[in-house]
Amino acid sequence: MFAGRFADKRKVEILDVPDAALTVDGTGEILFQPELTCLCGSDLPFFDGDFEGHEIEYPSVPGKSLHEMIGTVLETNGTRFSPGVRVLAVPFQQLGFFERYVLQQDRAILLDERVPDEEALLAQPFGTVVWALKKLPNMIDLDVAVVGQGPIGQMFNAGLRNMGARHIIGVDPLPQRLEASRAMGATAVVQNDGPDAADAVMEILDGKLPDVVIEAVGHKAQALNQCIDLCRYGGHILYFGVPPDTIDGIRWKAGMHKNLTYLTSVHPDFERTFPLAMQWIAEGRVDLKPLLTHRFGLDDIQTAFDTFRDRREGAQKVLVEFPALRSRGTH
């Protein structure tokens, strides 16, 4: 069977590897066949060769790096799914770039038949957002700034709109990213990534600062100082973007003098949170379709990664079809 890996910095290759099979003495496993995947910002450090400030060795291990995917259960030694059932699966350590692979059944959820494949796939990244939103206070009538308007920031816009926030202000230096923000739930946008962003936000809020600021910038960059500047006295900062091991130059005293509460979020649960994200999508509580900007076949996965990394043509969520999807006759 085939697998993918990064042969070198920003170079994707496909190679042959031994076929995957359920372990002889294993229980609770599924043999999963991916059909459709979506690139994520957390795949890019392995593609770029820099993960949290540590240089990555190449070639990478086979299977690195994909983890947002839907497909079919081929076999199982567990009891949760039957062969032929279609699921959303999240492979361990992002090792999902295989024609087939084995994972524990508790790292998958059923697809909702009301949802087209490409929207059901978004329940994985949106599930991480829902998990983070569950940590916030009651958002009704509160003002929020979402720093970073990539796919995750846009999903925060949509979720916050559902939660009753009064103002949802998208902040990003790239105008092409802000173009989608209002459609995704932002009530206002600020094109700025420097100290003047607080002045622009205060102008929108009649001289006030937001009650909640969400950092959704990503892996390689971080905007915690900007979030401290943007947040009101006694407010909350939700740090979603994945930081490096250490961050120098953070103005902790400024945040302390504001009596800020810091929240972090990682690793949603599969029992309630991912299914809730799927439910919100299926019931039309959120419309994430505007984020689906590009779609490629597996033969063009190098172009897919380049497009996603370089944000070409306003790229947000970039889909890649596996051969198994086309064999189903689904497009």
Image (cartoon, rainbow, N blue to C red):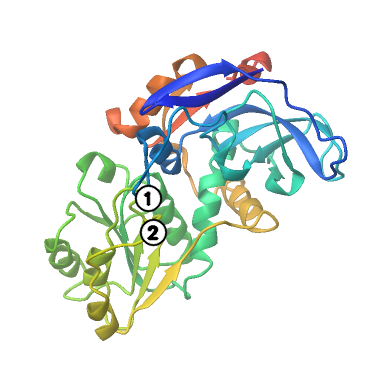
On residue 52, which mark appears?
Answer: 1
Tell me residue 17's x, y (percent): 64, 20
Q: Is residue 219 above or below residue 121?
A: below
Which of the marked residues, 1 or 2, is nearer the chain's N terminus?
Answer: 1
Quick one: 291 or 98, which is closer to the camera?
Answer: 98
The answer, for residue 304, to whether it is visible in the render is no
Tell whether 59 sits left or right of 243.
Answer: right
Tell whether 71 sits left or right of 84.
Answer: left
Amino acid, disc 1: Glu
Residue 313 quadrant: top left
Quick one: 168 or 273, which is closer to the camera?
Answer: 273
Q: Which residue is mark 2?
A: 245
Q: Is residue 9 above or below residue 181?
A: above
How far apart, in angstroms, are the residues tagged by discs 1 and 2? 6 Å
Tell me residue 149's x, y (percent): 32, 49
Tell me residue 276's x, y (percent): 63, 55
Mark 2 and mark 1 in contact (Cβ < 8 Å)? yes
Q: What residue is rendered at 49% in x and 14% in y?
A: 299
On residue 255, which mark appears?
Answer: none
Quick one: 46 or 150, which is closer to the camera?
Answer: 46
Tell whether 107 sits left or right of 28.
Answer: left
The answer, for residue 275, to whether it is visible in the render is yes
**Label 1: which secondary element:** loop
Quick one: 250 or 292, which is closer to the camera?
Answer: 250
Residue 145 quadrant: bottom left
Could you tell me which quadrant the C terminus lies in? top right
Q: What residue is rendered at 79% in x and 41% in y?
A: 29
Tell me residue 304's x, y (percent): 41, 24
**Label 2: which secondary element:** loop
Amino acid, disc 2: Asp
